[in-house]
Image (cartoon, rainbow, N blue to C red):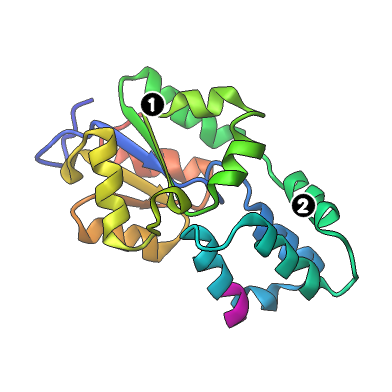
Amino acid sequence: MQNTNNEKKITTVIFDCFNVLYTPPIFNWVKEHIGSNFLAENSFRDLIVRYDLGEADENEYLEFLAENEGKGRSIPEVKKEIVGETALVEEVFSIAKKLKEDGYKIGLLSNGGQEFFDDYIFPVRTDFKELFDSIVISSHVHMVKPDAAIYMYALNDIGAIAEEAVFIDDSLSNVEAAIALGIHGILYTAPEKLIEDLKKYDIHI
């Protein structure tokens, strides 16, 4: 695992979840049922932050979405559709598994609701949860990316220092926040590109 490009070798790779390892179910549902423009609405963005911080629960979130869809549908109906949008990105999961096999510590650092993970991700794919040496979900720790505190919490939880870690996320602001703390950052766009980007740290899949 020698890293010829950095003073310290990389020992740890930390992944974002949604839009990297899993499809983003809520955003996909909103685009289909309410419209892409709604993603930029202040009311939606404010609720996202409160949900990710654990200040709004799943029912409040679902009720808000159902109301804004404007079709008078029940929360269970909306919930079923959102859960149906949830899918593991197998190519990226395979990359994470290979890294684990090669001896790297693997972390998950995600904004999101702990309930959603406990109910619809971890029970469905037990091998997903078992892969990680550390799992940090924003609503559980009441911190969110790109705040510095959650990155430091994740490093401490997995037992790594910033210079030895690579963080992978689809959000530029989240990646930049990690880099500002001395963590190596990769902006995720596609599995093939991720494999190429990891090579910069002498990590070969």
Is disc 1 surrounded by few (<14), some (14 to 19) or many (20+) residues within 10 Å? some
* Left or right: 187 in relation to 31: left
Is disc 2 surrounded by few (<14), some (14 to 19) or many (20+) residues within 10 Å? some
Instruction: Determine if residue 88 is in view.
Output: no
- Give the number of the disc on residue 79: 2
Q: What percent of the width, then of the height, locates residue 112?
A: 52, 53
Residue 162 location, quadrant = top left
What secondary structure predominates along the stretch shown in magenta?
helix
Give the total of numbered labels: 2
Question: Which quadrant does the N terminus fall into?
Answer: top left
> SS at mark 2?
helix
The verdict on residue 40 being magenta is: no
Question: Which quadrant does the C terminus fall into?
Answer: top left
Q: Residue at x 37, y 44 (%)?
A: 197
The residue singled out by tag 1 in the image is 99
> SS at mark 1?
helix
* Left or right: 121 in relation to 75: left
Position above or below: 98 against 159: above
- Identified by mark 1, the residue type is Leu
